[in-house]
Image (tube, rainbow, N blue to C red):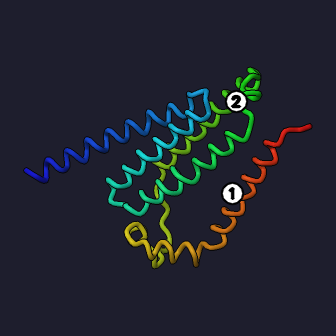
Amino acid sequence: MAENIGTIFQWLIFLGMAFLSVLASFLVITRKNPIHSALFLVLTLLSVAVLYLLLYSQFIAIIQVVVYAGAIVMLIVFVIMLLDLEVELRSKLKIVYSKVIGGFLAILFLFGILYAVVAKSPTGKVGPYTPDKVSTNVKAVGEVLFTQYLFPFEIISILLVAAIIGAVILSKKRT
């Protein structure tokens, strides 16, 4: 009886967080104020972190909160506040083009998701770091990240620094 109540409680949490995640992600793309969109993005990322907790992936949930909801969203807010977006939002022609391109990309992503669901998963060589081992062992994640994937990790950090520098340069007022 107690197991059944725990399972029902987990399903209720899952359904609530899944609904909240979908609703918040819809609000991210429909809000006109970019700061509100960034806040709804934080809500989306936090609800996805709860979904990771329900999957018993505590490490991924913590990384979701720290890296995405913390660092990346703060970077987005920083860039939004540096750039003058009011001038960009006044042009109706750009908004029409962005809606057409956004609709095309949404359909393209939908086809990609459908293909990923329908297609068979590729089989390949299984290495020493299986998904089960990496999802629960923080030491294994750090070992893989800083040995096998050190170069891509450093390239991403350089790209983030370049993006911040670019945002600062773009935000300077032309005299």
Left or right? Give the position of 151 relative to 24: right
151 versus 4 height, above or below: below
Image mark for residue 13: none
Q: Quadrant of the C terminus?
A: top right
In the image: residue 53, left or right of residue 149: left
- How far across and down, in percent of the image, does residue 147 sit? 58, 78
* Residue at image point 55% right, 45% down: 112
CA gap between label 2 and label 1 equals 24 Å
- Residue 98 x, y percent position in the rendering: 70, 30
Amino acid found under the numbered disc labelled 1: Leu
Q: Which is more foreground, mark 2 or mark 1?
A: 1
Q: How crowded is mark 1: few (under 14 residues within 10 Å), some or many (20 or more)?
A: some
Q: On the rendered structure, is 135 left or right of 156?
A: left
Q: Quadrant of residue 150?
A: bottom right
Residue under the image location 46 percent in, 55 percent down: 120
Give the x, y percent position of residue 168.
77, 48
Residue under numbered circle 1: 160
Left or right of 21? Residue 101 is right
Element class at badge 1 = helix
Question: What amino acid is at disc 2?
Answer: Ser
Given the current orientation, which residue lies at the most extreme top position? 92
Q: What element carries label 2?
A: helix
Disc marking residue 98: 2
